[in-house]
Amino acid sequence: MDPIRLLADLVAIPSVNPMGRAVSGPQYLETRMADYLVTFFDRIGVPCERKPVLPGRDNVIARYHAPDAPKHRVLLFDVHQDTVPVDGMTIDPFKPVVTDGRLMGRGSCDIKGGMAAMLAAFERLVRERPVGSASVVLACTVDEEFTHRGSSQIAHDGVRADLAVIAEPTLLNIVTCHKGATRWKVRARGVACHSSTPERGDNAIYRMARVVSLIRDYAADLQRREPHPALGPPSMSVGRIEGGQSVNIVPDWCEVEIDRRVIPGEVSSDCPYELRQFLQEHLEEADFHALEFLPPWVNLPALSDESSRDWVGELAAVVAMASGKTPTVHGVPFGTDAGPIAAMGVPCVVLGPGDIAQAHTKDEWVEIDQVERAAETYFHLARALGKAPPAPLLIA
């Protein structure tokens, strides 16, 4: 099956993640993408599960059972269905165009090129049924771009796998570790009054200004912590600030959104508590007690390279043979679906077509050659890694 034709189909199907915004319309959510995937698996004769995660957002999971399945490894191929929004794009986001060896459109790089390659490899496995191959669970997940709810649900539900391969743009290099993230809001309360007599109120924006200054100091302290050899130190930033009702009203509220990147060895859910303790030590009591710390909406674990250490040599040899280039092995600062899956005990690597520099851009594109080589690579990984299994792992 031609992966480029598949990619054109996928790009033409909007599957925009609303990213927490109160928006609606036919371009949002993964409903139509899940419909396409169910039809695809039905057409190649493979039963699949369509598992609701959020309203209108379903994981789609298909399984290829190798001819002598009980004796061989199980690989999990994971790829997400959603894309980032299309605001500011300078090309038609849902009209796949091929030019100069590239296919353009929203999601072409992140990560519908990887999805097309995995679907093509999966169909080839089903059609050829190579003896000695691994069995493959292909999980097409939702909501990767915002809260990773789809992959978290996969990990929670349970799947047997010896190794997970997560599709993200890596130029077909092997990523063995990455940072995780936690995101939450801090809200400052105040007292509103008419802006002509501001002394009668309590300006929540002024209070938050003191808080933001301290967060900047805390973020600088994080940069001085012991770094991870491949990923560097942890980091923190304030990404959004909002507050007040009108310019002529002293604001009675102000809130910031915080992004904290964690490295292997840190626990993402501990981060809000650590900042809270720092602010309590450095703020006046009245200012601290006027703060609310809202629960995180993202808790994405970091990926440690320890989980896949025993696989790297074998993987690199297969990738080099199938793709025609020797892959590098490295870490990346961004997070992926590998975080939740590895946290449940499954070794994970991240591997896919495209350059992360093209992801989320105004004229997003992926090289056709990368997608074609990725399809070969995924097929040969399944074909070559089936033998000599370790004891299978059970996520439960």
Image (cartoon, grey):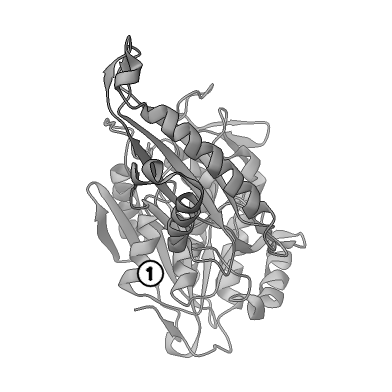
Image position of 151 (left or right of 168): left
Task: Decide: is 325 above or below 63.
Answer: above
Q: Which residue is mark 1?
A: 155
Image position of 8 (left or right of 396): right
Q: Which x, y percent locates residue 124? A: 50, 64
Q: Check disc 1 and report its element: helix, strand or loop.
A: helix
Q: Which x, y percent locates residue 270? A: 45, 63
Image position of 389 (left or right of 254): right
Residue 233 image-quadrant placement:
bottom right
Residue 331 image-quadrant placement:
bottom right
| Point 61% across, 60% down: residue | 376
Q: From this viewpoint, which residue is outermost toward the top?
A: 196
| Point 68% across, 74% down: residue | 312
Residue 377 image-quadrant placement:
bottom right
Give the number of marks. 1
Q: Which residue is at the front of the view, 228 or 32?
A: 228
Quadrant into which the C terminus falls: bottom left
- Would you say residue 170 is visible in this rendering? no
Q: From this viewpoint, which residue is outermost toward the right?
A: 326
Q: Which residue is at the front of the view, 165 or 192?
A: 192
| Point 38% across, 78% down: residue | 395
- Would you say residue 190 is visible in this rendering? yes
Q: Which x, y percent locates residue 174? A: 66, 63
Task: Decide: is 320 above or below 367.
Answer: below
Neighbour class for label 1 at 10 Å: few (<14), some, many (≥20)?
A: many
| Point 34% across, 19% down: residue | 199
Q: Which x, y percent locates residue 346? A: 49, 76
Image position of 349 (left or right of 273): right
Q: From this viewpoint, which residue is outermost toward the left?
A: 55
- Badge 1 amino acid: Ala
Task: Decide: is 314 above or below 290.
Answer: below
